[in-house]
Amino acid sequence: MRQVELGRSGIRVSEWALGTMTFGNQTPEDDAHRQMDMALEAGVTLWDCAEMYPVNPVTKESAGRSEAFLGRWFASHGRRAEVVLATKVAGPRNAIRGDQGFGNGTVKAACEASLKRLQTEVIDLYQLHWPERAHYHFRRNWTYDPSSQDKAANIALMDDVLGQLSDLRAEGKIREFGLSNETAWGTVRWMDRAEALGAPMVRTVQNEYSLLARLYDTDMAEVAVNEGVTLLAFSPLGAGLLTGKYAGGALPEGSRKALNGDLGGRASPRVDGAVAAYHAVAQEAGLDPVHMAMAWHRTRPFPSIPIFGATTVAQLERILAGVAVEMGPDLAKRIDEVNRAQPLPY
């Protein structure tokens, strides 16, 4: 698998990343360990986790279980050096610490707890899971209202967090810093404050991005190119919608939709038509729609690493079978035509 750089960090990683958010709820530990074996065998060296994982559902009792699965794999396999390990600290209004925000040592304490669960001395990429201020992610773009934001308070919080990250880096506990579910304003302000303080610079932004969710294509794309930020694209298969497993009203037992109903707001009245249109394009091209959706990221005019997640080994096998699929300009144009006809279906 081809290697790409994480931002301007000098760290080289695979152009696809393994997501682990189902490890511990939908995916039992033996299956999770097999997936890690398979990912590394396929050359997938960037693995992403979070302290709040697993999801579906997120609970205080299960939080940290995904990290613990990874930690036991590292302990039993001795291959930690082959993996670029990413994880995230949860923002306020979470199942772990309630309304507690990132300030006053929270980030540092959360990182140290993650290190213990992961059974490692260093986290290669440490990310903020979502902003502490109001933001438009998780389908909040339809009613986004930033009018209550306090710029001075937001900047003060950034300085506090960057101080904690500087301490963690000086102690050898993290290598690089990334954001998640961020905006263009937030990304650039974090970078400005990091430069002013000599703190860890933003290398990545982990936002939702797929054929069905293309908010990143405008302001964030410009930030990515000009500031040297790599997109870590979560839900590149539209939370399973693009795989076709929900076609015709199907509801597989144990699937994400069976567990949470509307796929976090993605199962909208318009999404079935958009999925069908992309499947028709894939059929015309003679491609598995999963492989088309993943290969499309290589066509973007900014760096994009899709983070795939698989509940089962069989799902992972299907995804990895498309590693070598390439996409020409004609197919990319057809995809853009569908996007213009059916934009933002959720």
Image (tube, rainbow, N blue to C red):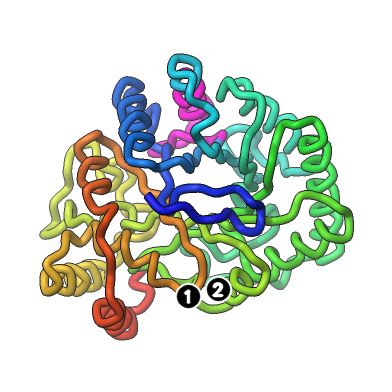
- Residue 343 versus residue 241 in the image, above or below: below
Q: Which residues are magenta?
A: 51-72
Q: Is residue 172 visible?
A: yes
- Residue at image mark 2: 221
Q: Is residue 67 left or right of residue 172?
A: left
- Residue 153 versus residue 144 in the image, above or below: above
Q: How many marks?
A: 2
Q: Is residue 124 left or right of residue 252?
A: right
Q: Position of residue 196 (x, y in %)?
A: 88, 60
Snapshot quadrant of residue 152 = bottom right
Query: In what quadrant of the picture does the C terminus appear?
Result: bottom left
> Does residue 251 belong to the magenta stretch?
no
Q: Nearer the viewer, residue 294 or 105?
A: 294
Identify the main secondary structure in magenta.
Answer: loop
Residue at left offset 33%, top offset 67%: 296
- Residue at image mark 1: 301
